[in-house]
Image (cartoon, rainbow, N blue to C red):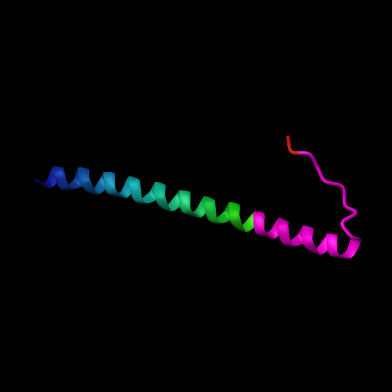
Amino acid sequence: MSAYLSAANRAANTVRVRATSAAKAETTRQRRKATKSAATAWVDMWTGGATRKRRKR
């Protein structure tokens, strides 16, 4: 029985770590996107939107 519980705990921890990692990565992506958007809005406000848009690769 102990071996079964150990295997179950190992599997549960693997799932927990992956879910936590994915959540942190998504939070970081959203924060970077919001920061970039806010910075662009400020620059556009001061320059009248005259900044050149960069092409995505």
Task: Determine the main secondary structure of the stretch shown in magenta.
Answer: helix
Residue 42 in the image, given as x and y percentages of width and height: 80, 64
Q: Is residue 55 or residue 26 the one in the foreground?
A: 55
Q: Residue at x 66, y 54 (%)?
A: 33
Residue 3 against residue 20 in the figure, above or below: above
Horizontal relation, residue 20 to residue 45: left or right: left
Camera-side residue of 49 and 4? 49
Measured as percent of width and height from the top left, residue 11 is found at: 27, 44
- Answer whether residue 43 is magenta in the image: yes
Query: Position of 55 compared to 52: left or right?
Result: left
- Residue at 27% x, 45% y: name it: 10
Kindly identify the residue that appears in the image at 73 percent across and 34 percent down: 57
Please give the range of residues in magenta: 33-55
Please tell me which residue is depicted at 50% across the width and 54% down the height of the picture.
24
Q: Nearer the viewer, residue 19 or 30?
A: 30
The picture places residue 16, in percent across and down from the top left corner, at 35, 51
Q: Is residue 41 magenta?
A: yes
Image side of residue 6 versus residue 52, left or right: left
